[in-house]
Amino acid sequence: MRPYEMTLAAAAGAIRRRELSPVELVDSVLDRIERIQPRLTAYATVTAERARRAARDAERAITEGRPHGPLHGVPMGLKDLIDVAGIPTTASSRVRAGHRAQTDSAVAARLSEAGAVLVGKTHTHEFAYGLTTPQTRNAWDAGRVAGGSSGGSAVAVAAGAATFALGTDTGGSIRVPAALNGIVGLKPTYGLVPRRGVTSLAWSLDHVGPLARTVEDTALVLDALVGPGGGGPAGPDSPSAPPEELTGLRVGVPRTYYFDRVAPQVEAAVRRAIGRLAELGARLVDVDIPMTRYVQAVQWGLMVPEATAYHEHTLRTVPDLYGADVRILLEAGALMSAGDYLRAQRARTLMRREWAVLFEKADVIAAPSVPVTAVKSGQETVTWADGTEEGVADAYVRLSAPANITGVPALSLPVGRDRAGMPIGMQLLARPLAEALLLRVGRAYERTQPAPEVASAS
């Protein structure tokens, strides 16, 4: 196995045993970036020389008996919304051309302290305002969308061009590209991971979280972001603690919403995965998802005016620098009334209360991450069995938005492929601050599956 193909946990173990050096690992990943970048365009900026210096420093520290933990010497990508001092943060937009961050974001500082090595900044849908990341192509089929807005991060991880990456999630922007590229993505509880130094889309919906090839790897990154020294879980309840049996765990299977207008192959794969959880000892419980008729109205009612407020100055001064799709959405936000925004906030409060009741009936909710796998690049609509059409962005955000509105943690993990070979994702949701539970369930499922493969980048 080539170093870039190794999972985070495997690479960390090899480095700890002195079977692999950080220099070898980083060089392997940088070579991989050079090979796949012209075809997949996962990166906005590649920091090769900086990464090689950091790898040498990590190797020296480890040799001298000063290891920082499992991320020490491991290459990572950061979404191009996340500030790193001295490196451009462009948000994949002409509006930010030439912008360089003056200080590290909170998450970049924590990962640097853990010894992770930055290899580059990954592309986002412009200012994270979209679900496809059009400049980036899917890791498994370059003729299909990568998903967004953290498409660059997901593709980099899936293709072996980063051992792990960070993304942001406002309406599904970690989980959607994770599902479409066959990797794991975690949207943590709202506020658990700090957003200081991260360009905002909509502040009351934004989350920062990890993307990795396995649930185990995802847990290791979360530990570095919120564990010892970060004010998060530690000790035996740490997300990276060994998973326990699922006996007696109540897994809620939605009767409403999450299996409505879902591609048959996606539904079949997710239901098989839910069945596997039952085989592992979980008890399946039918649940009804509350207030589903309001989900998309509340999501857009919060996101659109908040995004417009954030971009108010540049939208007035340099509107032509925005892409057409993003500019239209920003201009639409200026037309929304304060009353509409307040009604969306009120509905969100009610929805959070109803979801709290929901989690009295089930410990974890299991559902599809997205209703359809990666569509062809340029495809604008999805046609369902009843003949109705739905916009691609609306389809992708539909099943992920509830977790953003309510702020609950949500984990997407791969559970199969469709007939075209495109990955299918299952989403696990739990009560606030129950990341350790989600990761335990995801890890238990993962242990029943074959080891993940790096995408061929075909």
Image (spheres, rainbow, N blue to C red):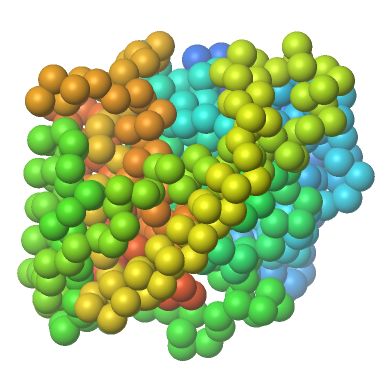
Is residue 218 toward the left or the right of residue 15 in the image? Answer: left
- State whether residue 1 is above or below residue 391: below
Pinpoint residue 253: horizontal percent, then vertical percent.
16, 62
Name the residue: 17% across, 66% down: 287
Residue 55: x, y in percent? 72, 49
* Viewer-proximal residue among 118 and 433: 433
Disc tally is 0
Q: Quadrant of the N terminus?
A: top left
Determine the residue located farthest toward the right in the rendered image: 102
Please say if 132 is above or below 116.
above
The residue drawn where x is 47% and y is 31% is 131
Task: Assign the C terminus to one quadrant of the image.
Answer: top left
Q: Find residue 93 and report its horizontal and vertical position in percent.
A: 71, 23
Identified at 13% across, 71% down, the residue is: 285
Direction from residue 172 to residue 74 in the image, left or right: right
Report the front residue among 16 and 407: 407
Query: Which quarter of the picture shows residue 70?
Result: bottom right
- The spot of residue 359 in percent (x, y) is 31, 75
Residue 142 in view of the camera? yes
Q: Along the horizontal axis of the image, is 358 left or right of 343?
A: left
What residue is at 74 percent from the left and 72 percent from the top? Answer: 66
Q: Quadrant of residue 57?
A: bottom right
Q: Is residue 53 above or below residue 39?
A: below
- Classify 175 as above or below 129: below
Q: Is residue 225 left or right of residue 213?
A: right
* Residue 34 seen in the current view: no
